[in-house]
Amino acid sequence: MYGRIRTLLTLLALTLTSLAASAQSVQWDSKVEPVEGNQYRIVLEATIPAGYHMYDMGPYEGGPNATSITFTAGEGVTLEGGVEQLSTAHRYFDQMFQMEIGTFSGKAQFAQRVTLTAAEATLKAQVEWMICDDTSCMPPEDTELTITLPEGTAAEAAIEAAPATPATDTAAPAAKDAVGSKGLWALIIEAILWGFAALLTPCVFPMVPMTVSYFLKGEGGAALGRLRASLYGLFIVLLYTVPIAAIILITRIVGGDAVTADIFNWLATHWLPNVIFFLVFMVFAASFFGAFEITMPSWMVNKTDSKADTKGLGGIFFLALTLVLVSFSCTGPIVGSVLIKSTSGEFWTPIITMLAFSVAFALPFTLFALFPSVLKKLPKSGGWLNSVKVVIGFIEVALGMKFLSVADQTYHWGILDREIYLAVWIVVFSLLGLYLLGKIRFAHDDEVQHLGVGRLALAIVVFSFVVYMIPGMWGAPLKGLSGYLPPLTTQDFVLGANTAAAPATSSASELGQRKYSDFLHLPHGLEGFFDLEEAEAYAAKVGKPLFIDFTGHGCVNCREMEARVWSDPRVLEILRNNYVICALYSDDKKVLPEEEWVTTDAGKVLKSLGKINSYYALKTYGVNAQPYYVLQGVDGQPLVEPRGYDLDVDAFVQFLESGVAAYRNSR
């Protein structure tokens, strides 16, 4: 039996390893661009995990593994020339290989021209590559892509199915989900922290010594007790992870990728789920404050507990199930928070984040069983456990505001402007600081007789955060919170705005009346357009290139780019003087007049501004994530390679300057 158990554990470990490795894998996507007549350009795009770089096509004799792309043409298509690197590699002299090499980070594009001599044809692309970070390299990988020429109904269906989702990483092609590797790892780390925080709640902490002692006094000696304790931890992980994985897998199997993507998109941008999420967070917070307990039905807990005394694997499973049910009043709100925050991500994100949470949550039970002497060093249960719950309650209130803010911005309700949002956060964290100092007590709290060093340190951190936020009430950018706060344009009072906005007012009068400018605005006093046709006409009139900003109300990275990159004086000067700006919101719910509706190639009628902009971005540039920046010339074509999320200000300045130079050369 134990041989089977070890086999099961080995298979699970391999599965978890493969899931973790997939987050570090390069994603390859292809698209077909018509050139002229029966000629096409096949573009392959590599999305490289954050922190890693991929080598260019070299070749490097005696050096690193260069990227290799080999096309095999089928009947009805011929290759024209060789593979071309569209992206510019970062070149430097590598001391280890003693040669100059080139690398790509973020994204890399390659192209192959072909001529189609039949109504339809296919060809294959064999791709080999290797990625490295600053300390090590992943093993070389390869994949094979099949491309159909010309792109027909399948491509149109993909365009129709892909939603406009707020991105948490760099812009990507249609096949890429909204959450990149950077955003995924941030969610994983947050889930792990929540898992450890759950351990320090009054529902869970007392269970640690009880369950560990149960295993240590079992039959078979200490070695068998440790094995059973390890299985106990494994069952806890499975009980948290398998249900959510099953729901998502069933959704994908029954409805396909499009249905799954639509569900995530609806959860991320529609007002109803966002308001529900906000209310759920408030209910969770009230529970942590002691207003009531969220518990499982007693009959369910008693039934599983009665089966926990059964010897063997079944007894261990029911003991784990009992722990999950008994601790639900404390872990339920945390689990809900983790899942809600990950629903706007890709297919695997909720599963992986719940896996991370459950592993962190179950880990102490296993470790304490392996090293029982550590139990003696654990602090005693007491009022400090309730204090942990209350602190989490304050954090739940603050985090819940984000969901209400997304609904407010997407539907233009105007009830949660930036200063109101900030006021709520300032009050919440001020109350948290007072609570840590013992000035506020809840029903289940013990009186704070003296202030410990830990409480004092936390209070200092919290009040420092409050002081940091206060200038935001007068318009300070608060770049560290830019991704969470509503845009500065929603703030009623900004100190010095009259002086700073003078140039923008002049510009606005020249632009005249613009579509959607009554409810859409650009940051930093910039003026521009929100309709592409209007922007193109004005750009042609004044003889300037067009800066197209594919953005979204719920896009955290868009706000961060605006706060950290656009705010640079060099960037503002170039945008204000050398470009006509057009911001296209991909998640705006404004329903347009019937004459402005767009019918897709598949026959679907798009009525809202966000869906129309999203369809245009996906059909024209193959992207459905934001932010995505395009510098467009007089012919409607990009002047330089478009750019996504990147906080490198100097690189962004160079991007803008290169667009201006290309525009001048094209005239």
Image (spheres, helix red, strand yellow):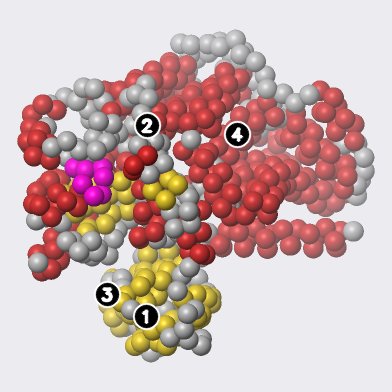
- Circles 3 and 4 in contact, beta carbons < 8 Å: no
Q: Is residue 134 visible?
A: no
Across and down, in percent, residue 615 comes to 40, 52
In this view, the residue in front, 266 or 405, is 266
Which of the two labelled residues, at mark 1 and mark 3, occupies the earlier sequence position? 1
Across and down, in percent, residue 479 comes to 28, 38
Q: On the picture, is 445 further left or further right than 640?
A: right
Residue 92 image label: 3
Residue range highlighted in magenta: 528-534
Which quadrant: the C terminus?
Answer: bottom left
- Circles 2 and 1 in contact, beta carbons < 8 Å: no
For the residue marked with disc 1, what is the amino acid?
Asn
- Cα–Cα gap, marks 2 and 3: 44 Å
Q: Which residue is mark 1?
A: 38
- Numbered disc total: 4
Residue at (38% x, 44% y) in the render: 597
